[in-house]
Amino acid sequence: MVTLREVRTSDLDEFFRFQQDAEAAHMAGFASTNPKDRSIFDHHWGELLGDDDAIVRTIDVDGQPVGSIAAFVDEDSREIMFWIDKQFWGQGITTDALQRFLTDFPERPVIARVVVDNIGTLKILETLGFSELREESNFSNVRAAVVTEKVLQLS
């Protein structure tokens, strides 16, 4: 059963481990310059968890943390991001977790950014009612190249 809960300190070790998967990082497109540097990871998560405007949850399946989901304010809009351990891809967990999150936190509009070749995430967002606003080109540290991102919105 998929549940969302407050992030525990012990979850961060799992989140850091998830980030080490090269294929997952490639699909996400955006991660720190050095994903193996725990101090950079800890700094990022410290800022996110310390942000009073951010809503951050652990995605839990049967008592096991399998990912994270967060909404934060970027400029004038609320943006959502999420990461699921690769071993749980394709099982409906991400869709279920994102749907629960959006139900629990109904503030709209919500923005999501996805690299255009991340078809799985695009399908999830479109299934949940996100629609494309525009495309942007940005440099991806993970891919060491400029990538095209779709910017989607849920109204």
Image (cartoon, rainbow, N blue to C red):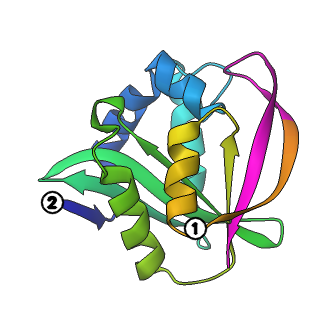
Q: Quadrant of the C terminus?
A: bottom right
Name the residue: 12% across, 53% down: 62
Left/right placement of residue 111 relative to residue 71 reads right
Q: Which mark is residue 36?
A: none
Rendering quarter of residue 77:
bottom right
- Residue 78 image position (x, y, % from top left): 69, 70
CB atoms at circles 2 and 1 under 8 Å apart?
no
In the picture, residue 17 is in which quadrant? top left
- Vertically, is 32 above or below 107? above
Of the pair 115 and 22, the residue shown nearer to us: 115
Callout 1 secondary element: loop
Magenta includes 144?
yes
Q: Give yes or no for residue 143 being in the magenta stretch.
A: yes
Kindly identify the residue that appears in the image at 27 percent across and 44 percent down: 91
Q: Is residue 62 visible?
A: yes
Say whether disc 2 or disc 1 marks the residue closer to the N-terminus. 2
Magenta region, mostly helix, strand or loop?
strand
User: In this picture, which residue range is highlighted in magenta?
Assistant: 138-155
Question: Viewed as shown, does residue 95 lie left or right of 77?
Answer: left
Q: Amino acid at mark 1?
A: Ala
Q: Quadrant of the N terminus?
A: bottom left
Residue designated by label 2: 1
Q: Which residue is mark 1?
A: 54
